[in-house]
Every structure is written in structure tokens, then in C-alpha cells.
Amino acid sequence: MTLLENEFRGGTGGTHEVVEPATGNVLGSVGVATPDDVAAAAATAAKAQRDWARRKPAERAAVLRRAGELWEAHAAEVQDWIVREAGSTRPKAGIETEMAAGICFEAAALPTHPLGEVLSTGEPRWSLARRVPAGVVSVISPFNFPLILAIRSVAPALALGNAVLLKPDLRTAVCGGVSILRVFEEAGLPDGLLHLLPGDAAVGAAVVDAPEVSVVSFTGSTAAGRKVGEAAARSLKRVHLELGGNNALVVLPGADVAKAASAGAFGSFLHQGQICMTTGRHLVHESQVDEYVEALAEKARRLPVGNPAEGDVALGPIIDDRQLAHVTDVVDRSVAAGARVLAGGKPDAPFYPPTVLFGLDDTSPAWREEIFGPVAPVRAYRDLDEAARLVNDSEYGLSVGILGDVGTAMQLAEEVRSGKVHINEQTVGDEPTAPFGGVGDSGNGSRFGGAKANIEAFTETQWLTIRADIAHYPF
């Protein structure tokens, strides 16, 4: 779908049914794009972008401010879609619409943000480095936080004078795509600047390969991110990758166990564990591990699971059968390797209960792999050196939480390899003003959030020199 001449034009790839994961009911359908649609959209976007970049900063800022107001005005309607289409609980859906508004309000400040610097020079001239729009930006976003993980790139890219090709996950193409297109239409975004292109892997490849595209912003699995990175590298395009995680929560000796277990439950079970920042590994000092694991298991047993559209539940459905099978497989293989299930552990399609595992080692699948499900593996550690080793013994490096004495936590924070470290908070957290990203298999650094990271992500640096008169040359 693309917004042209105030009309929505569907893709040429037919339609895709929008399915409610909790019930299997069909909620509607969306048009599906093809690579030919991508080519047409990219050409249109490149043309529209040139005029948009010339607009006064105040004009672009006004569109972003209006978009933020519209997210607030239509929050309940959008939340309904996030609950039903993504299987989110109502509070989690509220986080998404609140963040979407905040991201747009922050982006509204970007057009008037300082976009350059005066450089020193040995010549009789002015020497400047200024940031100019990158051009056309492709945004590829996933299903788990469909609104936030799309709008966090769409909004700043538009604010800084770019056009955008948005390819959301087909499973959440309404709340992660259609809603964004509609909001920016109502906010007054000129035609041709934002193109919605739901589709399969071929469409994903096309939005990376399109010659008009200069920057690719991808959020998703590490395996898919490698393919996107390889494709972008062949075309010498910048690519921003925010990928998977197997995040550690460290409970320091002497920490309040009840509070720590509450933080650990939230970190592992929010949105059924389908978050890149989910707490995937719980490291608890050996003096308190038995108390902690008992408290965490008790919380897991009490958390209600069900259809979030029909009741007040803590966990909704797993997004689809394939992901449910993956979660089940990881838990089953871990149990076969010696892990003990203290809560949960058995699927009830399309749901998976909050699960606590104990008795794992370095080779346990639930300890080594990103599960993307509501599973909390717990292990003990002896001292800070061992805690740091266990935290860093992972290919991923996205988020770490440390609970307990702040001084001790700061010592440990100096030793861990991670894009984010949260002291006395669990691993899941984001703000419109904060740089977001990971290292290792979690991505190629902080690529979103806050003025500095967003400007670096969606503009190019241009060197500009100015003399009072034409320079003299010996030729």
C-alpha cells in the first residue's frame, strides 16, 4: 500500500488474511506487495523526497507533532488492534501507543536540531561539516512490538527529510503498518513519502536492493539480519541492525529476593517472552538461589494466561504455531539434557505457560539459545568474576540487568559486554530519548533513539567549504 494523490493503492500480490493468534479468527485482510511494487514505490519516494528535504524545518516538525497527537487521540483504537493482531496484553499495547506518540514528539525536534559543526582549517576559508538527508530509507520491522519497532525508524527518518519504504511483518501489518500510514496521512505528510509494502522475503530483498535506497533499518532475528547485512554490503549501503538477544539478569548477594523475583518475572514473561530484550538467563548468587527460584516459580504458577481481548491476563498467545513449536522444542531438549521444570513447561496451544527451569549448565539449550518465549532459566554463581563470565559467555550482547547493591552492581557493569546495562531494573526497557542497540550477534551498535543516534542513522555527513572569492590555482 502506498499513499499517492490521497488514495490508498493496494499491492499487486493479492491479499493476506489478518489472523488473531489467540483464536485463529480472521480479522480482515491487507494487500500484499511484490518486488515490482517495491520498484515503483522506491522511484516515487526518491522523487518526493527531494521536495520534502527542501521544506522548511518547521513544516516537517509540524507533521511529526501532529502525528504524535494522533497517536494519543487514537490510542484506544490502535491498542485494540495490537491486542488482537499481535496477541498483546492491554498494558503492553498501551506501552506501544505511548511510545509511538513520544517518538514522534521527539522526532519533531530533529528538523531544528543543530545539524553540523564548524571545522578548523589551515586555508583562508570556512570549513563546515553538515548533515544532509540520506534520501530513501527502508525500514523492515518485526511482529513482537510492531508499532514501536517500526515508528522508531519511520518518524526520525521522515523528520530529517527522508522518504521511507516500510516493510512490516505480515502477521502484524495492520498495527505495525496500516496504522502508521493512516496517522501520517492525517498528520499532513505529503504524498509519495511513506510507502507500506507488506510481503514475503522477496519483498524484503527488494526494499534492500532498490537502487534508490541508501539506508536500511532492520529489526528482527540474527539469522535474517545477517542476510540483510550481506545484501546491503553488496550495494555499499549503510545498514542498521537490531537483532536478537539472550539477556542476563544478575541478582547480587543480599538483594531483596521478593523484589528481584518480581523483576525477573516481568523480564521473562512480558509479552510471552517475545521481546529481544527478554530476560533469558537468571544468574543468582548461590546464597539465595533456592529462595529466588522458589519465589519465581510461585509467581509463574499464579500468572493468568489467556486471550487478552477477553480478559485481564498477564500472558497472551504465542504469535503462531511455528514459534510455539520452537519454544516447546527448546524446553523439551533442555529437560532431556537434565534441566528441571519448576513451573509450566507444557504448551496449551496457542498458549505457553510461564515456565521456570533450574539445574542447567553451559550447554543447556535453554541457556545457550534465544527462546523468544515465556521461559526463565535460572542458575547459581559463586562470585562476581563468575557472574561476569556467565553474562559474557554468549554470542549476544543486547541488555543486562543487575539487581542489588549499587556499588557492587557498578563493578559488575564495568565487566559486562552489552549495549544496555540496567542497575536495579530488569532487562526490558526503552525510551524515545535513549540510544538503543546491541553488540555481537545482537546487532551493530546503538542505531535508534535520541537525537544524536537518529541523526547519525538517517543523514549523511557532507563537507562544505566557503571562500570569499574563487581560489587561485597554479594551472
Image (tube, rainbow, N blue to C red):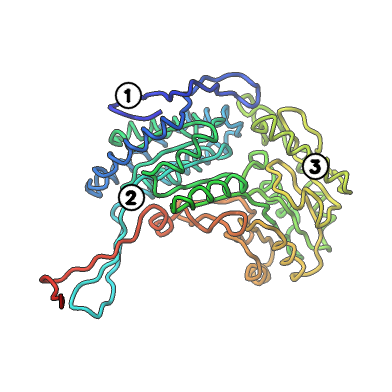
Residue 187: percent from the left, percent from the top?
A: 32, 35
Task: Name the residue furthest bottom.
Answer: 122
Circle 1: is it few (<14), some (14-19), or many (20+) Cα within 10 Å?
few
Q: Say what secondary structure mark 1 lies in.
A: strand
Left or right of 105 in this view: 345 = right
Question: In whole angstroms, how far apart are the C-alphas of marks 1 and 2?
Answer: 25 Å
The dot on residue 331 is 3
Quadrant in the picture for residue 48: top left
Q: Say what secondary structure mark 2 lies in.
A: loop
Whether residue 2 is visible: yes
Q: Earlier in the sequence, mark 3 or mark 2?
A: 2
Residue 429: percent from the left, percent from the top?
A: 57, 51
Quadrant in the picture for residue 472: bottom left
- The quarter of the rendered structure image containing the C terminus is bottom left
Q: Amino acid at mark 3?
A: Val
Q: Amino acid at mark 2?
A: Leu
> Which residue does the numbered mark 1 point to in the structure image?
7
The reply to whether discs 1 and 3 touch (Cβ–Cβ < 8 Å) is no
Q: Residue at x 37, y 49 (%)?
A: 107
Left or right of 300 in this view: 78 = left
> Which residue does the numbered mark 2 point to in the structure image?
160
Question: In whole angstroms, how far apart are the C-alphas of marks 1 and 3?
Answer: 48 Å
Q: Residue at x 78, y 32 (%)?
A: 347
- The quarter of the rendered structure image containing the N terminus is top left
